Amino acid sequence: MTVSRTSAGRQVPSRTGGPAPSGGPRRLVGLLRPAQAAASGLLLYASFPPRPLWWLAPVAFALLASSIRGRRPRAGFGYGYLAGLGFFLPLLMWTGEEVGPLPWLALAAVQALFIAAAGSALALVGRLPGWPVWAAAVWVTAEAARARLPFGGFPWGKVAFGQAEGWFLPLAAVGGTALVGFAVALCGFALADLVHRLKRPRSRTAALAALAAAVTPVAAAFAASPLVSTRPEDGTATAAVIQGNVPRLGLDFNDQRRAVLDNHARRTMELADDVRAGRVPRPDFVLWPENSSDLDPYRNTDARAVIQQAVAAIGAPTSVGAVITPDTGTLRNTQILWDPRRGPVDEYDKRRIQPFGEYIPLRSLVRFFSSDVDRVKRDFGAGRDVGVFTMAGTRVGLVTCYENAFDDTVRDTVTAGAQVLSVPSNNATFGRTEMTYQQLAMSRLRAVEHSRTVLVPVTSGVSAVILPDGTVTQRTGQFVPAALVAKVPRRSSLTPATRFGPLPEAALVALATAALAAAAIRAAHDRITTRRRTAGANAGN
């Protein structure tokens, strides 16, 4: 029997029975929660492509909840940070592929702070009835903040982007990434609550409620399945996706800019030979990737001639990714609509440009940590207008590479009239890392979210054709020249997710805010009550 003290200072026998744990076991118990938190982040990472282990995500949330619930917000912050590091350190390893570990570690450390803040909030709302719902809304709120701050945000690693293979995917057509993330988190948190309730024989009703909360997101996803369709609403179009490949991997791939351009022109002319020979159907339009011509075709007559020759050979309007270099001001990452007879007829300038990649914020400060910032000698500027090309009667919406991670940028391309989406990208900088597969999964989710075919031309792979149900019908390997030709459905109807836009996310943020306010009021009331009881007990003595 051990002895403890009451709040009034009296000694009373403890009901725990047996000796107190020794130092060794106590230390092991103390390490259990931190280990669970870190493991939850690792499991969440493991649920992302290229692994088809999407079902690990709810398990990760269940483990996160078990490490945080019942703890104070300060402890929740620490456990959340461990989970964030467990997730982002392996997920974002590709960011240090060519520039060393410092940028990768710094990015992961900053992104983990958002998970830490979520952990603190989870500890607070975990004391409320129905806590799995509020906790899932808190997670979506953290993702919403991360998608906007700092430097315009970094949505990479949203839970929804790991669910391209999973049961929750149809929910993207209802409420976009926010609803998918909410469903996955709710399922996981409810599983943790269910396990907790099952340990208490008298909590049968509460256990049933937890089970219902865990099952409801899955049932809702199956109920949303009729929204997912590949039926052509506006007929079909035959599209060609060109992957020219690059001379070598790494940051210096574009030192041979002419070679990259020649590769894409050559593969396009080989496709033209295949069309004339009847080996493949003639495409209605052709898509080249981002940076397929880093030589400005408006200033370089040789580059213009090479592009014109290739486009004339295939005889179809072609979207060409080029870097435009004005005499003054910023560079432009541009897609040029190139007509076989008239040459350049339309442009789209990338609107979401990558901080520390396409432009360098705080350049003098960042240079102190890494001289690689000076590889970006001249910053890119952001475009303003939505990009939709009319290509042989098909309205092709343009979402260039990094833009694909941002909900609003993809949505307004669809609402501007896109019947098909193109995601031209350049992944050569990141070698053979998981980055390209993570990005491909984003395109699969966007296909379902907006019920559009998504065509993905990439300089070095993986290029792909994705139907509106998220199915990848064709894909290339990495660092090989290739051309994909496919007949794809054109669609113009708008899914609920497209119509609602940011409203589902805003509703969940409001829900989380209300829950946090209620939890804070409740915690304050409990502290006041405790103080009064303590004061009364002391007065009685």
Image (tube, helix red, strand yellow):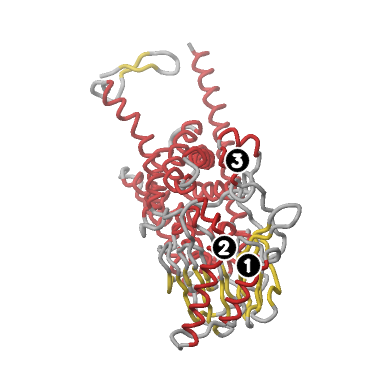
* Res 296 quadrant in image: bottom right
Are circles 3 and 1 on residues that touch, CB within 8 Å?
no
Graded by Cα atoms within 10 Å as few (under 14), some (14 to 19) or many (20 or more), the crowding at tag 3 reads some
Q: Which mark is residue 415?
A: none
Residue 339 place in picture, x, y as percent: 66, 78
> SS for tag 2?
helix
Q: CA distance from mark 3 to mark 1?
A: 60 Å
Task: Give the label, 3 or 1, closer to the camera.
Answer: 1
Q: Going from the N terminus, do you reach mark 1 or mark 2 first?
A: 2
Q: Going from the N terminus, do you reach mark 3 or mark 1 first?
A: 1
Disc 3 marks a residue whose amino acid type is Ala
Q: CA distance from mark 1 to mark 2?
A: 8 Å
Are circles 1 and 2 on residues that touch, CB within 8 Å?
yes
Are circles 2 and 3 on residues that touch, CB within 8 Å?
no
The residue pinned by badge 2 equals 258
Quadrant placement of the N terminus: top left
Q: Is residue 23 above or below residue 507?
A: above
Image point 31% across, 30% down: which residue?
29
Q: Which mark is residue 303?
A: 1
Graded by Cα atoms within 10 Å as few (under 14), some (14 to 19) or many (20 or more), the crowding at tag 1 reads many
For this view, does 404 lie left or right of residue 40? right
Image point 54% across, 83% down: which residue?
236
Image point 53% across, 65% down: which residue?
446
Task: Give the label, 2 or 3, closer to the camera.
Answer: 2
Q: Going from the N terminus, do you reach mark 2 or mark 3 first?
A: 2
Disc 2 marks a residue whose amino acid type is Arg
Say which of 245 and 237 sits in front: 245
Disc 1 marks a residue whose amino acid type is Ala
Q: Is residue 225 visible?
A: yes
Q: CA distance from mark 2 to mark 3?
A: 59 Å
Q: Which mark is residue 517?
A: 3
Residue 512 place in picture, x, y as percent: 57, 47
